[in-house]
Image: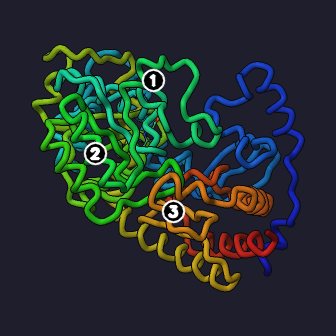
Amino acid sequence: MNTLQTFPLTMPNGPISTKLFDLAKKYIPGGVNSPVRAFRNVGGDPFFVQRAKGCRIWDVDGREMIDFVGTWGPAILGHAPIPILEAINNAAKEGVSFGIPNPYEVKMAQTICEWVPSIQKVRMVSSGTEATMSAIRLARGFTGRHRLVKFDGCYHGHSDSLLVAAGSGALTHGHPDSAGVPPAFADLTSVLPFNDEAALEELFEKKGHEIAALIVEPYPANAGLILPKPGFLQKLRDITTKHGTVLIFDEVMTGFRLAKGGVQELEGITPDLTCLGKVIGGGMPVGAFGGRADIMDYLAPLGPVYQAGTLSGNPVAMAAGLAQLRELDKQKGYAYLEEIGQVMEDAVLDVLKKKGLNYRWYRKGSMFCLFFTEKEVHNLHDAKTSDLASFRKFFHHCLDNGVYFAPSQFETGFISMAHAKADMDRTAEVAAAALAAL
Ligand SMILES: *Cc1c(COP(=O)(O)O)cnc(C)c1O
């Protein structure tokens, strides 16, 4: 049977989502608890989800969708996997939160240090934002310097020093520099274009002695998906070592998604500090930052840099995260994700070829982005050459036909272990029709 017949071409937002959004807007700013969920970049109203299982989500109006957002990265096993549900249940029976050390957090720390060799010691937090914010304070405390370097289009959470030329929702909404960030904070953040060695050298020559930390998404995944040119990450390592700057890899998105040891394992680069989040929480609110023991020991209670959290190392969240990591390992997750990622890639390239479109496709394992531009994308400037009107049409066509991609051109797509070849075939069919309708 033609699968499109079971997914009629027009399925407008059902009335329950609309009613919920109206109510939400009355009580929640913009109706959402995180801006990109508001669909501002693609137009229309967001749908409300009823439940999710495997690679599928069902909205409150009963529409079924194949999901390529995966709760923005964490759902690497797919939604609501049994081992995680069991781990949550078992841990919760013993108590939901203690504020006292518990065995799960020790096991989690040990697992992270074993999987990511550059991490000798690690501290757990409750979000990626907390991880990057804390890592930067630590780097400043350790070096006694104040300046921070980041790259245009990289998103590192929403703390003050980092909302300068940021990606993700901040980019989507057209004001990367947030109101409410004092200019004195923003002044301490230098922003460079990604993949530009000359700009990097110039900045470090002038200001190297005052730069506490350089923070980077080693594969920037919050302006679409951008890959480093050969040698660029090594250049970051060399120049920060030379100038006594702490090199921070923000692997909140890439950590445990691409390999046990993240991008640093794939690229053979050892950062000083690493930020983690998303996949390690198994869908629960978890982040972590860790790295060189001599730097980590600057944290309270051992050292002078203060950092704390009532719910940090929460037993239920740790149990969920540990179950996710254990299953990834047990089921040889990274091998499968590469395999199914290749299936998707072959299908996408085939569709583009048949349509005579030269749009740029980038993929690493289970992360992907199709830029609606013919220009190669090496930095944010290139990404912005994308045809956003066409992306918008494509997005809505796919959504109306049961395939949910991220509601913005400037986001990465995620494949989970619950995506099978049949799901990729259906996705290709829908995407081909969407591109034909542009
Ligand atoms: C999502 C993300 C963050 C922020 O994490 P939250 O849990 O949303 O606070 C930071 N850095 C990167 C690279 C991310 O993708």
Q: Which residue is mark 3?
A: 368
Q: Earlier in the sequence, mark 1 or mark 2?
A: 1
Residue drawn at the location 76% of the way across and 43% of the way down: 47
- For the residues labelled 3 and 2, the Cα–Cα distance comes to 32 Å
Q: Is residue 280 left or right of residue 395?
A: left
Decide which of 110, 351 is in the foreground and name it.
351
Q: Secondary structure at mark 1?
A: helix
Question: Residue 39: where, in percent of width, then height?
Answer: 72, 43
Q: Which residue is mark 1?
A: 160
Residue drawn at the location 18% of the way across and 21% of the way down: 144
Q: Which residue is mark 2?
A: 202
Q: Quadrant of residue 397?
A: bottom right
Instruction: Between label 1 and label 3, give the one nearer the viewer.
Output: 1
Question: Residue 222: where, in percent of width, then height?
Answer: 50, 47
Q: Residues within 10 Å of mark 2 (few under 14, many from 20)?
A: few
Q: Is residue 266 above or below residue 274?
A: below
Q: What amino acid does circle 2 point to? A: Glu
